[in-house]
Image (spheres, helix red, strand yellow):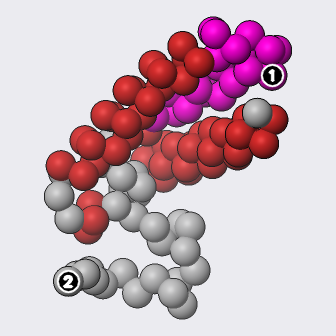
Amino acid sequence: MTALLLAQVVYATVGVAYNVVSLRAVRAGRQPLSQGSAAAGLAVMLAYGASLSLGFAGLDVAYRAAMTLFIVVIGYAGLLVHLRRGPSEYYRTSYLVPSSVSTGQRVEVV
């Protein structure tokens, strides 16, 4: 289970970083990286990361209960809500992708 927990730590770290970058963009007067609330996303990812300590402490029942909760929260708010919002033109990746790769043009996938 240690490999799974380490993968989850990486996921939580990336999630926190993404939301921090989005919050900083808004504070600098730019658009956020996505339409979702970066503050709420940051809070969820911090709570998710903190709940991983249950797994590292060997509290398997509590860890599994927390992961069940986060499957619902992240699965709904972090995935389904974004998918229902429509085209990916609402999301910005220019902070994360080099400008030589990201042209800023909308690309349609057929």
Q: Nearer the viewer, residue 89 or 26?
A: 89
Q: Is residue 103 magenta?
A: no
Image coordinates of residue 40 in percent, x first then y, are: 42, 29
The C terminus lies in quadrant: bottom left
Q: Is residue 77 left or right of residue 52?
A: left
Q: Is residue 52 highlighted in magenta?
A: yes
Q: Which mark is residue 110?
A: 2
The residue tagged with tag 2: helix, strand or loop? loop
Q: Residue at x 43, y 47 (%)?
A: 26
Residue bearing mark 1: 56
Q: Looking at the picture, tell me which residue is in the foreground, 1 or 43.
A: 1
Where does residue 1 sit, x and y in percent of width and height? 76, 33
Q: Amino acid at mark 1?
A: Phe
Question: Can residue 53 be seen in the rendering of this structure?
Answer: no
- Which of the two residues, 110 or 77, is positioned nearer the viewer here? 110
Horizontally, residue 40 falls left or right of residue 18, namely left
* Amino acid type assigned to the residue bearing label 2 in the image: Val
Residue lying farthest bottom?
100
Dominant secondary-structure state across the stretch colored magenta? helix
SS class, disc 1: helix
Nearest the eye: 46 or 75:
75
- Examine the rendering and report whether any part of residue 51 can be seen: yes
The range drawn in magenta is: 41-63
Measure how far apart labels 1 and 2 are at the Cα level. Answer: 43 Å
The residue sitting at 38% across, 26% down in the picture is 72
Corner quadrant of residue 31: bottom left
Q: Residues within 10 Å of mark 2 (few under 14, many from 20)?
A: few
Nearest to N terminus: mark 1 or mark 2: 1
Left/right placement of residue 85 relative to residue 23 reads: left
Residue 32 on image: x %, y % = 39, 52
